[in-house]
Each structure stands twice: as structure tokens, then as C-alpha cells.
């Protein structure tokens, strides 16, 4: 049966964002931040201010989920994530996310739809069992399937064997997939990812003596010359927000800077070459504006060459290229050509300009002469809206659809910069 006939739902919940939609569709129905706002009821039973959040009566907790609710300044609202290291840590907030998705985006009874959900390749058996129990007993769904996100990425690109490089918010991971199964002994993880680049951007603004001011604080601003201090007026009567929520709003500004300005150099970073690169103009919400030159290349360089990153003790972390080659080297020698032959790149960081070109160059230099690498990146590479119910998960073969074979190098990049660090889920048909 096709996804349209079954009405199956697909959930891909990552460290940065939640993507959920109907199997068979090209785009997710829902795409919102994984982090949520949380407030506790006061002694008199009221929340700190009148809200329209999702309230859990049993615990007296109100959750604020999705961008429209999360970015409203509220007194005493903390920001937290239900995930840690890609796995579910806080089950109450995770359930609140599922409740919100069903209620606000699908607007349908959970019992009417089978569910396919992605999971981290290193997820534990205990968490899998608890999640399965939650879906069947609480949501009463008719069918449920948990699949490794790396396997789904490989299948969505028409491959049952390949090396999946996932560079997201919290980590960059190389995961070998062989005949539809993850080879656990070959998983290699690095903390050099999106959050790491955000930290590097913060340090850059500190060196420039520029304070990050989120939009919620700004009542008005005046135009200023390039590089001059910002001239802005703060809003009056702002609620007493928490440090975690303020930091989240600052991170949103920094992530927009990353998506708009950063670029990966096509060769190892050279200061003289970087100084000749075109600059990129960027204006912060408070009106401060500046042209960024070598900095826009040096910050993402840390993903590929950790020795260029500030604040790292020693040089023990692996760059992106070494993560791939180390992972392949930990697998059986007979399957290495198949892994090098299909490198599937996924995750928000891979949408940074120049990322895949640099990776392709590094792998070409590090790959043995008799093993040719093939690098594939698909629009929204991460889950399987058009894959969940018409693919044989035992063999990775699509039933009734033409497989995507690709060329030696097949790259399809997202054209909307507003999505460049936020969405990476839907597959092409």
C-alpha cells in the first residue's frame, strides 16, 4: 500500500527541530523547534501570566511549543529540550510535543494513523521499549515502526548501503549502513557541529565588543554607519524573563548570522587567501551592521580542521573528513568500497555554502585510489515522507517506484536561506 492509502504519519524529532508529516508528501506538515518553554503553576493554581500554552493538569506544568508561542517573552518561562545526545531524556515534555503535533498540525485522532518514527542510531533498548509503550498505550495507534535515522537517509537516497554523514546541532556523526542495517562498531561522533559554531560566533562578537540584542527587547532603532555602535531604544515593561529563554533568543540571532554569512573554504584555511574573499554585509536586530570577511571562512573551518578553532584544548577532536574516513576504516575491508561509493550527507550544517564541495575535495584526497567516493545530498535529507510505507525496509527496495541512482556527484541544495539551518527532513520522490 502507498502512503496515501495507509495515511501513515512520519515523525523525525532531532536535537534542533521537529519534523512531522504524512507519508507520500514532499514536505513535512509540521516543522518547529525541539526546545520548548515551560512554566510551573503558582501556589494559587495560576500561571505567571494569562497564556494559551498546552497545560498538563497532572503536573501543573504549562508547555509553550512552536515558534509563535516559544518566542513570546513570559515571566519565569524556562527553555529546555526533551532530548539529550539525540535520545529522549524528559518524557513529559516529549509527550507534550507529540500532543501538540497531533492537535495543532495533524488535527486528527492518533488512533487513525500508523506511525513511522526515526531514532538515533545509538538509541538504547530501554528507551525504544518505553517509546513503543507510549505510542500504543497512550496514543492507541494501530501500527508503529522505529527505524534508525541513518537507515532512512540511505533508503531515501535509493541506497541500502552507504556512509551517512549527519552534521546537526549537537554533533557530527558518521554512520555506516550495510544492507539496511547500521554497523554499530563503525559509528564515529564529533561534538564539532552547529552549537559549536554558535559558540565561535559568540566569541567573535565579544571580540568586536558587540552585544547580541534579541528583537524582543527592541522598541525602535536608528540607522548607523557601518561598524558604529548601535542606536536603539529598549522596550518598556518587559516581563522578567529567565536567563535560559534570553539565551535561546540570542542563539536565534546567532543562528541567523550563521545561515546568512558563514561559508566553508574549498581548501584548507589560508589567511591571505581568506582576506581576498568577498565580504558579506550583515545587520543585527539592534541596527549594528558590519562587513565580514575572513571571519566568515574561519569559523566553519573548525568543522574540518579543529586546530583552527578557538577554545579547544589540545587537538584530539576529528574534523568532518576524518570522521568519515575513521568510520569507514572501522568497518570490514570488503564493504569499504560500497561505503565510499555512497556518502550521504545530511543535517543542517551541510547546507552552509561550500560544505559539500570541501568534503568532496577532502574525501578525494583521502580515499584510496581504487575506491571512488560518491557524495549525495538531497533536499531535506533526513526522513522519509515518500518512503515510509512503500519501501521494503528489509532490502531497501522501493516497490512501484524508480530508484534514485544518481551520478558521480549529485548535489541538490536548498534555495531558501531561511531553511538553511532549520529544516532537513523531506525526501524527493
Image: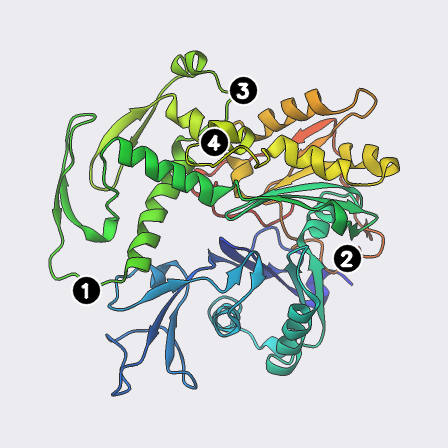
| Sequence-first disc among 2 and 1 | 1
Q: Label 2: which residue?
A: 390
Of marks 1 and 3, the one in the foreground: 3
Residue 259 location in percent, x, y?
42, 37
Query: From what the image shows, is residue 119 above or below residue 350?
Result: below
Instruction: Determine whether, in the image, residue 347 is placed left or right of residue 196.
Output: right
Distance between the alpha carbons at the discs numbered 3 and 2: 43 Å
- In the depicted view, which residue is nearer to us: 86 or 6? 86
Dot 4 falls on a residue whose secondary structure is helix
Residue 39 location in percent, x, y?
33, 73
| Sequence-first disc among 3 and 4 | 3
Instruction: Determine whether, in the image, residue 425 is placed left or right of residue 204.
Output: right
> Looking at the image, can residue 353 be seen?
no
Dot 1 falls on a residue whose secondary structure is loop
Cβ atoms under marks 2 and 1 closer than 8 Å: no
Residue 268: numbered disc? 3
Seen at 64% across and 22% down, the residue is 361
| Sequence-first disc among 1 and 3 | 1
- In the depicted view, which residue is nearer to us: 361 or 320? 320
| Category of crowding for the residue at label 1, using alpha-carbon neighbours closer than 10 angstroms: few (below 14), some (14–19), many (at least 20) | few
| Sequence-first disc among 4 and 2 | 4
| Sequence-first disc among 1 and 4 | 1
Of marks 4 and 2, the one in the foreground: 4
| Sequence-first disc among 3 and 2 | 3
Distance between the alpha carbons at the discs numbered 2 and 1: 50 Å
Q: Label 4: which residue?
A: 300
Distance between the alpha carbons at the discs numbered 1 and 4: 36 Å
Residue 336: numbered disc? none
Amino acid at each position: 500500500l502507498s502512503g496515501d492509502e495507509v495515511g501513515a504519519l512520519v515523525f523525525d524529532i532531532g536535537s534542533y527541530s521537529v519534523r512531522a508529516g504524512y507519508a507520500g508528501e514532499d514536505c513535512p506538515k509540521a516543522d518547529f523547534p525541539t526546545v520548548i518553554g515551560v512554566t510551573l503553576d503558582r501556589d494559587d493554581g495560576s500561571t505567571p501570566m494569562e497564556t494559551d500554552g498546552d497545560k498538563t493538569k497532572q503536573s501543573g506544568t504549562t508547555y509553550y511549543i512552536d515558534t509563535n508561542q516559544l518566542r513570546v517573552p513570559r515571566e519565569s518561562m524556562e527553555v529546555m529540550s526533551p532530548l539529550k545526545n539525540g535520545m529522549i531524556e524528559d518524557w513529559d515534555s516529549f509527550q507534550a510535543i507529540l500532543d501538540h503535533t497531533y492537535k495543532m498540525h495533524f488535527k486528527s485522532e492518533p488512533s487513525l494513523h500508523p506511525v513511522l518514527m526515526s531514532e538515533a542510531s545509538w538509541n538504547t533498548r530501554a528507551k525504544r521499549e518505553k517509546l513503543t509503550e507510549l505510542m500504543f498505550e497512550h496514543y492507541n495507534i494501530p501500527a508503529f515502526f522505529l527505524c534508525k535515522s541513518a537507515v532512512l537517509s540511505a533508503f531515501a537516497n535509493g541506497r541500502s548501503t552507504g556512509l551517512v554523514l549527519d552534521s546537526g546541532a549537537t554533533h557530527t556523526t558518521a554512520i555506516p549502513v550495510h544492507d539496511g542495517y547500521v554497523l554499530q562498531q563503525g559509528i564515529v561522533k564529533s561534538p564539532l557541529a552547529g552549537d559549536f559554531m554558535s559558540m565561535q560566533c559568540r566569541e567573535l562578537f565579544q571580540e568586536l565588543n558587540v552585544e547580541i540584542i534579541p528583537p524582543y527587547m527592541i522598541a525602535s532603532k536608528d540607522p548607523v554607519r557601518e561598524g558604529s555602535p548601535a542606536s536603539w531604544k529598549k522596550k518598556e515593561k518587559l516581563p522578567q524573563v529567565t536567563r535560559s529563554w534570553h539565551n535561546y533568543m540570542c542563539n536565534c540571532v546567532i543562528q541567523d548570522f550563521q545561515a546568512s554569512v558563514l561559508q566553508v573554504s574549498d581548501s584548507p584555511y589560508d589567511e591571505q587567501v581568506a582576506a581576498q574573499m568577498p565580504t558579506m554585509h550583515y545587520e543585527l536586530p539592534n541596527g549594528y551592521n558590519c562587513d565580514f570577511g575572513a571571519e566568515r571562512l574561519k569559523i566553519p573551518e573548525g568543522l574540518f580542521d579543529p586546530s583552527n578553532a578557538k577554545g579547544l584544548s589540545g587537538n584530539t577532536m576529528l574534523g568532518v573528513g576524518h570522521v568519515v574516513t575513521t568510520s569507514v576504516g572501522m568497518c570490514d575491508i570488503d564493504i569499504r568500497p560500497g561505503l565510499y561509493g555512497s556518502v550521504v550527507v545530511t543535517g543542517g550544517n551541510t547546507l552552509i555554502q561550500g560544505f559539500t564541495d570541501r568534503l568532496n575535495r577532502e574525501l578525494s584526497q583521502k580515499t584510496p585510489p581504487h575506491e571512488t567516493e560518491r557524495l549525495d545530498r538531497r533536499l531535506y535529507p533526513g526522513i522519509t515522507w515518500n518512503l515510509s510505507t512503500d519501501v521494503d525496509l528489509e532490502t531497501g527496495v522501493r516497490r512501484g517506484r524508480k530508484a534514485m541512482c544518481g551520478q558521480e556527484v549529485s548535489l541538490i541544495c536548498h534555495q531558501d536561506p531561511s531553511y538553511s539551518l532549520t529544516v532537513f527532513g523531506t525526501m524527493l520522490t
